[in-house]
Image (tube, rainbow, N blue to C red):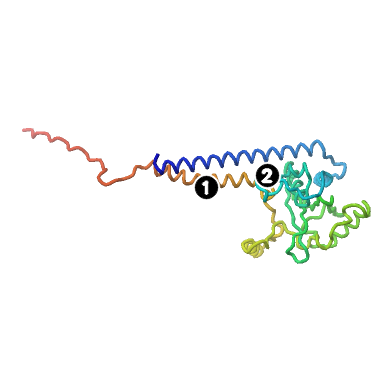
Amino acid sequence: MNFRRLCFNTFACLSLICFIGSSVCYLSYKNDLAYLKSVIQSQIGKEHSPHLFAAINHWVYQNQGFRKNHDFFLFKSLGPTPIQVLERGGDCSDKSRLLMAMLDSIDVDSTLVMLYDADNKTPTHTTLEVRDKQLKAVADPVFDLVFPNPANGFYGLQDLRDNPAILPDRLDELIRLRGPSNKIAFYKREQESYQYATTINWNKNGFLRFIADGLKKAGIEPRNIRRPHFLDEPKLLISLMLLLTGSLLLMPVLMIGRKASVPAYTPGSARVMPEQPRHPLRG
């Protein structure tokens, strides 16, 4: 076996392994969504709220505890899957991840939202904004918190950012309803406000800051851009990473195969036509 054939077989096998792994992870991700949808259908009603997203938010709040979930799928840095959060609970980022996945399972779009301290540098809390058709509504599964708009519907992320009084007014209302011993009474109002709320941490590095500046110049508010779901869905993220890796590994396979299909030219290899016999002259 020559070196070219060895490279061809190696890259082809690695590419195939990546594609199979990607398919397995994606199917597992879709199965998780199907299971979450069945949980909604069997266990969550609209008794708590006529709006399904608020009922799901209430269910996630009541499900399991609030300690950080240290489970993970393949890579610890990616954190727990929504199913692992459902089974063992989690903190604000974990429960928001579960809420996002449950909404996704019934085709309700949403995005995670990160809150920052007054310095606009220290992340303090994670919530979620529902973005379903015309509805934009913030939901906090750690405090069972939504923001009804007396006029119509609910308050969204931009509303809370533009009008800081909405948060303390809602907290005061819920403390009166639930009592001073309820978890809502311990909400950190100054550290977990929506003044600097954003869907993506644009200050994480210079590259993201450069993109954010470009979006602002184009008239787009970067803090409102929908956060890609695959960033908070470990199985989906790994599936996409394997798909990309497999595609990159497939490129040298195609290049090697193409070169192998074209015969190499060597000097003197041109076909020489045999000389035709001469016919005698006819008188």
As measured in the structure, the alpha-carbon distance from the residue carrying label 1 to the one carrying label 2 is 24 Å
In this picture, residue 200 sits left or right of residue 91: left
Residue 23 marker: none
Q: Quadrant of residue 202?
A: bottom right
Q: Residue at x 59, y 40 (%)?
A: 21
Question: Residue 56: x and y, percent?
Answer: 81, 44
In this picture, residue 205 sits left or right of residue 38: left
Which residue has dot 2 on it? 73
| The one of 257 and 103 positioned closer to us in this rendering | 257
Residue 113's place in the image compared with 21, above or below, is: below
Q: Earlier in the sequence, mark 1 or mark 2?
A: 2
Residue 248 marker: 1
The C terminus is located in which quarter? Answer: top left
Question: Residue 87: x and y, percent?
Answer: 77, 41
The answer to whether mark 1 and mark 2 are in CB contact below 8 A is no
Q: Residue at x 68, y 49 (%)?
A: 76
Check disc 1 and report its element: helix, strand or loop.
Answer: helix
Q: Residue at x 33, y 44 (%)?
A: 264
Label 2 environment density (alpha carbons within 10 Å; few <14, some 14–19, many ≥20): some
Residue type for callout 1: Leu
The N terminus is located in which quarter? Answer: top left
Question: Residue 31: x and y, percent?
Answer: 69, 37
Q: Residue at x 79, y 39 (%)?
A: 40
| The one of 275 and 95 positioned closer to us in this rendering | 95
Check disc 2 and report its element: helix, strand or loop.
Answer: loop
Label 1 environment density (alpha carbons within 10 Å; few <14, some 14–19, many ≥20): few
Residue type for callout 2: Phe
Q: Residue furthest left?
A: 283
Question: Residue 127: x and y, percent?
Answer: 77, 53
